[in-house]
Image (cartoon, helix red, strand yellow):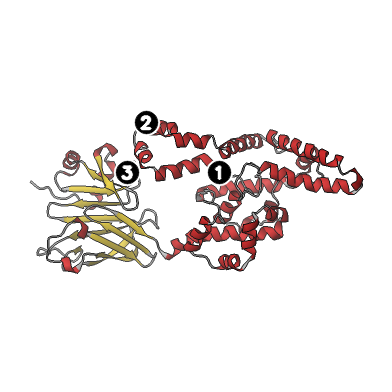
Amino acid sequence: MTAMPPDPDRKWAILAKIDLECWEQRGTSSQGCPIWELKADWLRVMFKNAYVSVRACAPAGMRPIYAVCFVTPEGLHELRVFSHLRTGEYYDSTWRFGEAPPGIGDRVGHLGRRRLEVALTNGETSVASANAIWMVDPARLGQQLGPQDLRIRIFCPTIDETVDVNAATLDLAYQENQLEKQMKVVPWQRYLFWLTQLRRIDKAAYGRIPKTVRRWLEGADGQACLSRMSEQDVGRLLQQGMLPPYLAWLNPQEAQQVMDSIRVQRGVAGRQDVLQQYALMMQIPGFNPIPRLIQAIDPGRLDIFDLQVFMTIGALRELHGFVEVQQAELIKRRPDLQAAMQSPQGARQLQADSEVMALAADPRAQAWQAEQLELQARRAGNYGPTSPEVMTAMQVITNIQQQQLGMMMLGSNLGMFAGLNAAEQYTKLALANGPPWKLYKPYCC
């Protein structure tokens, strides 16, 4: 006997209580998200035969759910698709993929009504209007329809969001809107902008940019990209090695932590007791450990893209280390590691993988560990030179002394020459094992 479907509020309350073990993965969406189906025995227990299937598109752990479809014995597909632009908001629609029975009402889509007006809602109020369209090929109407024919497109003009979902398989795909496409380009434009600003703010750092990149920046092509840049331009420049392979990771909720670091550094830049320690260590009067870029900018005018750029070029320390970033990229391109991560022993298998172990031995991973030691020292109140900085400075002093032996005849100009040369030698030594886009050694705090 078929049970009556629960009222909508109770239906979603039941769904929220269902444990992960009650679901079985049925595939993966075209954008890489797992598709799950509620196991038959749990379907009977939880919904008392009111539905013949319940599917959901959600990451491992079933949180958050991106889309879910309840199918009734009468063939109604009760579909909820969550917005990826507006957290917690969603679109509800109901479909019968066939002829409409008498009395079906005007809120159900079917062969005679392939477009529905639906709402983007937060569960309490309607936020915006949207259209949900059954994208069936008209030539297929009147024929036996298969799962491939049950594709729904939802478009919300207010937020420029387009979502495609197959009501049968629950394959879900969010289409990029114009703003999202632009946001892919903006961080790279900002990267190029700050490189050009270094020519005015810090000539020494500008001189550390590879010559091919400097020439391109100063030419017509570089200037054009500063004002107008496309995704194709980004891809081309990445292939040519004109851009770093990725910008430093930074989540919006981490931005305040980075801004706090800038505030601390700008304070240190004016502390004579700290600067005196560095002057004594390096024998360079007036040496300042804070990157000139950090001293020159107005923090109140920076946004998250600026912070990403500063971290990428080394003016600020990165919050996510080399191993973490590269490991995430490795998992993306290794389906076997993706599958392993779903098991209880996934973390152990990951650490035993040969490519993961090679990442840990990379010099950039060791540099990250050294930065963490510096960070600990600074957070303990030691704003002066750290042990690695002292060792680098000793190498510089040795080099300068060797230079002085051969330049005794330069007289009074020797001190000035040695000081300027020492500051640049120190930076180059500190960056020796880093990638070419690292223009600064960050002051880790």
Q: Amino acid at mark 1?
A: Leu
Of mark 1 and mark 3, the one earlier in the sequence is: 3
Residues packed near mark 1 inside 10 Å, few (<14), some (14 to 19) or many (20 plus): some
Q: Name the residue at 90% across, 43% down.
A: 408
Of mark 2 and mark 3, the one earlier in the sequence is: 3
Residue to which mark 2 is pinned: 345
Q: Name the residue at 72% across, 56% down.
A: 203
Of mark 2 and mark 1, the one earlier in the sequence is: 1
Mark 2, secondary structure of its residue: loop
Q: Is residue 111 left or right of residue 390?
A: left
User: In the figure, residue 304 lies in which quadrant?
Assistant: bottom right
Residue to which mark 3 is pinned: 62
Marks 2 and 1, how far apart at CA: 27 Å
Q: Which mark is residue 319?
A: 1
Residues packed near mark 3 inside 10 Å, few (<14), some (14 to 19) or many (20 plus): some
Q: Amino acid at mark 2?
A: Gln
The reply to whether dot 2 and dot 3 touch (C-beta < 8 Å) is no
Quadrant in which the C terminus is drawn:
top right
Front one among 92 and 191: 191
Q: Amino acid at mark 3?
A: Met
Marks 2 and 3, how far apart at CA: 19 Å
